[in-house]
Amino acid sequence: MPCSLLQGTRPVKLRCQESGQLTAGKGNCPEQKKNCLGQKRKLSGTEKEPSGTEMELSGTDRKKGFRIIKMEILELENIYNGIGYVQSAVLGAAMLSLTLKTRRGRKKSILLWAFVVICAFLAGILSYFAVSKAGYRIMEAANGIEEIWKLQMFYSLISVMNVLEGSVAAVILCAASVWIYEGRRNIKIFVSVLFMLVFSSVFYVYKQIMYSLFSSGMIDEVSLSRVPPDYGMRFLIDCAGMAILFAGYRYLFRDKLVHILELAEEQICQIVMVPLLSYILFLAVRYTMDTYGVTLRSTDAGTFLMALIITGSLLLIYLLMFWAIFRAILASASSAKVKAELDVASKIQLSALPVSFDIGKEKGVDIFANMHPAKEVGGDFYDFFFVDEDHLAVLIADVSGKGVPAALFMMGGRAMIRNQLLLGLDPSEILKRSNNELAENNKEGMFITAFLGILDVKSGHFSYSNAGHNVPFLCHEGGDVEPIPVRHGFVLAGMKNIRYRTQELDFVPGDKLVLYTDGVTEATNAAYEMYEEKRLTEVLRQSVKEDVEQTVRAISESIDAFVDGAEQADDITMVIVKWKQEDQHS
């Protein structure tokens, strides 16, 4: 990455060359004001102290010599800045290729990246040259200014230009990723800027430390920092750092990032500004520190400690911030994925329930049913179908628990009971056989309450058996509502070889049989009061003249008014069968 313009200079503490005095603001030393400006212009680690021979030169010759040396140094710095851009482009290409899919072939992608690297090299040279020239013009304009706050404004302007110059590499990498790789644009920009943030921050600290360790031993007397090693050593240090960064990403973080991008693509697209702003903030802090000589190469204990605290704190903040962001993204994405899967499961479950309520109309029977799961999928279920031409089977059941486990157990229980019904057995025998099969592999300890009945649509004779379920109500056209006689049996899947009993009754034309689960009577309002059977009975009396669909809707509206927005705690399921006798149906 490029070095900061005027790195290591201090606007409020300058050393006069001839007097050796520290002066504030511009050079105020009476012996030599202009040489203090020369100290301001000095680039850390690039300008050497004048030798004894140079000190003996006349003022004009010395200034001319300094300008020649300065131009040579700038040329080297320009080239090395271009090399820094090449380093960021090469490392970015390697890391992006491990993370994203190319939209072109491998060979063509290599050629495109070669073109990007050349562009990055030229951009690095030109951007650094432009910012350097502008910086020196600003420093010349600052010469003669007495007010400290104005001088600080000039230095702030230099920091802003350095930030803009440092952002060019990120712009190049983002443009290359959008051009070369597949996927959504925000994803590619997010990954590119994230890599540049890691490269800039971690690589900056690494270079500061390594440059200090391999320093030539010279000290910049203005910034009081160690002069970096020669360009050859810097290049080797940079290459070693790039290899370490690439290996660390490939073997430690690549799979994790790819997993996050695959799982949370939509969420990542919404936070693309986070790494962008983080990168700009880091550049602003870095170049401001460099401008004022606050670096990890400083020999001054206080300055070094300040640089260490600022840099360490910023890196720690970024680490914690992105760790929290990625954790939240994964949690959100996992939740969204589970919700999507539950939505599919809910549709599958509902599709397994009968949705056509016209199967009995030609035989004088009206049927309507409704189910409201407490979660995306529920444990209640119902079923009705003709086992032969004259006998209609009606089933309602409630599985212990809620959610996916209850839904899966429900599907198995429904299939077993339905298969036994097709054999033409009476209700008690059907429940007995189903119970034994369900209890066979019931390792989770779940159970089912069920009510099963078979209606002879010609005579109105109804035979039924109960396995621990809520007692149904029978509504007569005269207005009477009564629970049917029920002998409770044990729940299904509780234990094997349970005996159930078949009971019988005869319908009168116009009678309605109301089957429901405990989610109806145990619906709870905000005051933790239950709906209970008495409220259900009252609604049934008021709806005795209504058809089956209107009766179900009346019960649902009554429950909604009672709970008044309180969270639904259990599945709510109802099935109503009305027998009109075959010669009375409309």
Image (tube, helix red, strand yellow):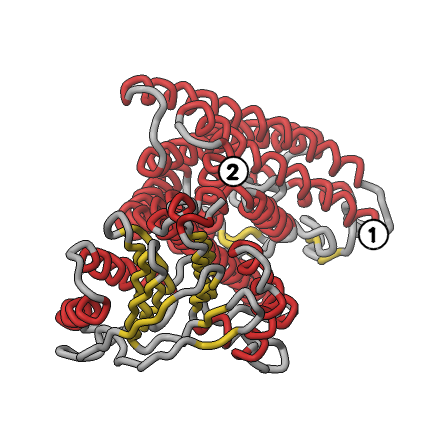
| Percent coordinates x, y for residue 438 in the rendering | 18, 68
- Relative to 544, is 349 above or below? above
Camera sees residue 337:
no
Which quadrant of the figure has residue 127?
top right
In this image, 498 relative to 82: left or right? Answer: left
- Relative to 436, is 312 above or below? above
Q: Which residue is mark 1?
A: 149
Q: Amino acid at mark 2?
A: Pro
Residue at point 74% right, 55% down?
12
Foreground of the two, 189 or 159:
189
| Percent coordinates x, y for residue 565 in the rendering | 63, 67
Foreground of the two, 164 or 288:
164
Foreground of the two, 131 or 411:
411
- On residue 345, the disc is none
What is the crowding at mark 2: few (fewer than 14 residues within 10 Å), some, or many (at least 20)? many
| Percent coordinates x, y for residue 457 in the rendering | 34, 55
Identify the mark nearer the N-term, 1 or 2. 2
Q: Which residue is mark 2?
A: 2
Residue at point 83% right, 52% down?
149
Camera sees residue 364:
yes
What is the crowding at mark 1: few (fewer than 14 residues within 10 Å), some, or many (at least 20)? few
Residue at point 36% right, 34% down?
100
